[in-house]
Amino acid sequence: MVKRADKEQSQVKRATRAAYGVTLAHLADEGLPVVAVDADLTGSTTTKKFAQASPDYADRLFNCGIAEQNMVDVAAGLAATGHIAFTGSFAVFGTGRAYDQIRNTVCYSNLNVKIAPTHAGISVGPDGGSHQMLEDISLMRGLPGMKVLVPADYAAAEAALKLAAYTPGPVYVRMGRASVPAVYADGVELEMGRAYVLREGSDCTIVACGVMVEQALSAAATLAEQGISAEVIDAFCVKPLDVDTIAASVAKTGCAVTVEEHSVFGGLGSAVAETLAATHPAPVEFVGMRDRFGKSGEFAELLEYFDMGVPAIVEAVKRVKARVAIC
């Protein structure tokens, strides 16, 4: 069982992106040949903090300007010379605009490049639909050889970046802009291919990832007050997915709800449905963005507007339990 944040720690909110630059500096301190390649967003992505941590590290941050395709190719070249190359941009640009380069330069050659953008999902907030990337997990998950990590909080982001650095080959780490409550204790160590049961239950399995893990835990607490016992799993690693943990949970509860700050097509929900179809067929409901773009607004407002917050999760659990009863 991984160490969870205590009540006092959980009230401290930090963005997952805030872990980026400082963690790269820690990895460099450990002797790893990490480099950062950014697309004119070193302040927003926090890769600037890596360069500021030591005069020696200043030469290991490469700013390519507003040229995301070039950024990925530069990272690929650095990886080919023995470096562990991390890219930095907003998720909408770092995956969407540079998809061809990620596919054909990084993944096709299995290079040691880590695609680690920030500002993913509707938690970007006022930046609006053009910048709210809700298809990136689907894009990255479909690439051969790409591993996909979606951390729930600052501590998990730190663990994901370290894990990416020590894992050979392409890795995608999805980070966000919004400050979110702590789920894990500082210094937590997470594993590739693992999902984590954060709350045990018997009536329904809620599988969540990223900043929606905290929403899932809050929904489980609300459901408990109504006599419904929900098990909450953090699918920290969306690819490769922890089939055993998820299948075992659903075998116990009989149904599942997936929760993600992403389109319901091709992301965590699809991965869980595929897994259950092959291992333990059961009713599944999906909480996420439904075939539309985002809008400008604050994160909490958008969760409610798009039916992705705690009330939506609670209702999804009730719907899926009703389907079990019919079956």
Image: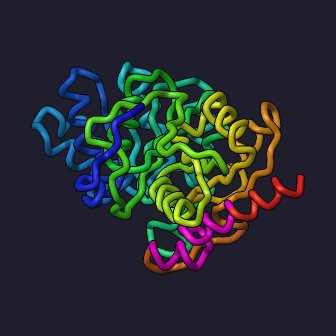
Which quadrant of the view contains residue 242?
Answer: top right
Q: Is residue 163 left or right of residue 52?
A: right
- The reply to whether residue 80 is in sight is yes
Q: Decide: is 177 above or below 35.
A: below
Viewer-nearest residue: 153 or 11: 11
- The reply to whether residue 164 is in sight is no
Q: Which residue ends up furthest to the right in the rendered image?
A: 327
Q: How many marks?
A: 0
**How far across and how far down the image is residue 150, in percent?**
49, 45
Name the main secondary structure of what is drawn in magenta. helix
Viewer-nearest residue: 225 or 158: 225
Q: Which residue ends up furthest to the left in the rendered image?
A: 55
In which quadrant is the N terminus drawn?
top left
Viewer-nearest residue: 55 or 229: 229
Q: What residue is shown at x 21% (from left), y 23% (from top)?
A: 30
Q: Is residue 52 left or right of residue 182?
A: left
Q: What residue is shown at x 11% (from left), y 37% (from top)?
A: 54
Q: Which residue ends up furthest to the front in the rendered image?
A: 227
Q: Decide: is 134 above or below 238.
A: below
Q: Is residue 252 left or right of residue 74?
A: right
Q: Is residue 163 left or right of residue 11?
A: right
**How far across and how far down the image is residue 209, in percent?**
53, 49
Q: Is residue 198 magenta?
A: no
**How far across and how far down the image is residue 154, in percent?**
32, 48
- Give the colouring mode of the picture: rainbow
Which quadrant of the view contains residue 81?
Answer: top left
Q: What residue is shown at x 49% (from left), y 28% (from top)?
A: 192
**How far across and how far down the image is residue 324, in percent?**
81, 53
Viewer-nearest residue: 130 or 105: 130
Q: Which residues are magenta?
A: 299-317
Q: What residue is shown at x 56% (from left), y 73% (from top)?
A: 129
